[in-house]
Amino acid sequence: MVAATALALLLAVGCGSDDDSATGSSGEEEISIETGSLSKAAFIAKADAICTQTREEFEKEVEAAYVEEQKNPPKPTEVSPLVGFYETDFVDLYEEQIAKISALGAPQGDEQEIAAYLQGVQDGLTEAEENAEAFFGPFIERKGGFKGAAGIAKAYGLRVCA
């Protein structure tokens, strides 16, 4: 179940910059992305590469936390390494992904779609911080999460980020 949860939580990245920008604003933190110089195909390739990097780091860190928890089971009054990972490192890892994708800049005319995707990820992270059980439950049930961000990514053409 841990492996399924871990694998379900993987997402994306991007690169570029210009003057135009778009925002997504359904959560507390508003995502802003500028127009970049990349074509859609180049953006997708770079974003999926960032998502691959995030996924690999996520898998490495969650596995290490799982192994640590198996070696040294926490006492009832202690936070388990796996729970600790989800409460701290998970959010940091995906906020870094958001920053990298934002730094790419969206292809001209695609700013709203990319901002909506990134906002969905950010909203999911906010939810994870506020109510981890409500956020991670859909992953365990294989129903997804991140406020529909994966669907937006898939519709746009992102594969690893979806």
Image (cartoon, rainbow, N blue to C red):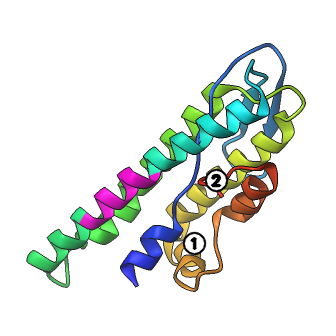
| Kind of residue at badge 2 | Val
Q: In the picture, residue 143 is in which quadrant?
A: bottom right
Crowd tier of the residue under label 1, counting other residues whose Cα lies within 10 Å: few below 14, some 14–19, many 20 or above: many
Q: In the picture, residue 113 is in which quadrant?
A: top right
Q: Quadrant of the C terminus?
A: bottom right
Q: What residue sits 63% from the left and 50% below the top? A: 122
Q: What residue sits 74% from the left and 64% below the top? A: 148
First to last magenta residue range? 55-63
Labels 1 and 2 touching (C-beta < 8 A) = no
| Kind of residue at badge 1 | Phe
Q: Earlier in the sequence, mark 1 or mark 2?
A: 2
* Residue under pointer 1: 135
Say if residue 155 shows up in the picture. yes
Of residues 115 and 41, which is closer to you in this image?
Answer: 41
Residue 158 placed where, x, y %? 69, 50
Residue 121: assigned label: 2
Of residues 14 and 130, which is closer to you in this image?
Answer: 14
Q: What residue sits 57% from the left and 86% below the top? A: 141
